[in-house]
């Protein structure tokens, strides 16, 4: 599977964005940029563990023109490797 990019999170874990998932994000959430996803994983404002294998990473982007300033990046871990499932802007980081 082709990767768009790999980034290391603040705990040293490798997280990948595949071409397939980038096409999904780009189609459903065209306001999300690849650089914003990389920044969110690399230097998140907050990380919320939704389950042992799924984490939500958040980062605040003040330049957005809507009330949705927090980028949520959903990462699933499989065999200690992280894969970005989707990413979109939300009103709050929770």
Image (cartoon, rainbow, N blue to C red):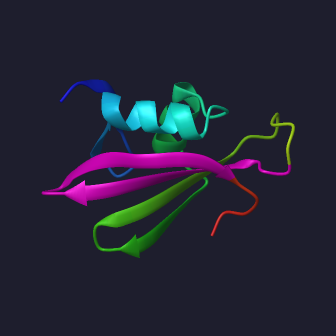
Q: Residue at x 56, y 40 (%)?
A: 28
In magenta segment, residue 74: yes
Residue 56 in the image: state x and y as whole percent: 48, 60
Q: Residue at x 38, y 49 (%)?
A: 85
Query: Would you say 6 lies left or right of 69 here?
Result: left
In the depicted view, which residue is nearer to us: 62 or 27? 27
Residue 24 in the image: state x and y as whole percent: 45, 38
For the C terminus, the image quarter is bottom right
In the depicted view, which residue is nearer to us: 54 or 42? 54
Q: Which residues are magenta?
A: 67-89
Q: Where on the picture, by quarter, is residue 36?
A: top right
Query: Would you say 33 lies left or right of 92 here?
Result: left
As drawn, which residue projects farthest toward the left? 79
In magenta segment, residue 37: no
Q: Is residue 35 visible?
A: yes
For the N terminus, the image quarter is top left
As drawn, which residue projects farthest toward the bottom? 51
Q: Is residue 39 visible?
A: no
Is residue 65 shown above or below 3?
Answer: below
Q: How many marks?
A: 0
Residue 62 in the image: state x and y as whole percent: 81, 40
Q: Residue at x 42, y 32 (%)?
A: 22
Is residue 8 shown above or below 71?
Answer: above
- Decide whether the magenta segment is chiefly helix, strand or loop: strand
């Amino acid at each position: 599977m082709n990767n768009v990019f790999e980034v290391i999170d603040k705990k040293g874990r490798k997280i990948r964005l595949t071409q397939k998932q980038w096409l999904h994000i780009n189609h459903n959430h065209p306001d999300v940029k690849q650089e914003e996803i990389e920044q969110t994983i690399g230097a998140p404002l907050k990380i919320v563990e939704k389950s042992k294998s799924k984490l939500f990473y958040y980062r605040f982007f003040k330049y957005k023109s809507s009330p949705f300033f927090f980028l949520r990046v959903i990462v699933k871990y499989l065999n200690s490797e992280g894969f970005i499932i989707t990413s979109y802007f939300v009103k709050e980081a929770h």
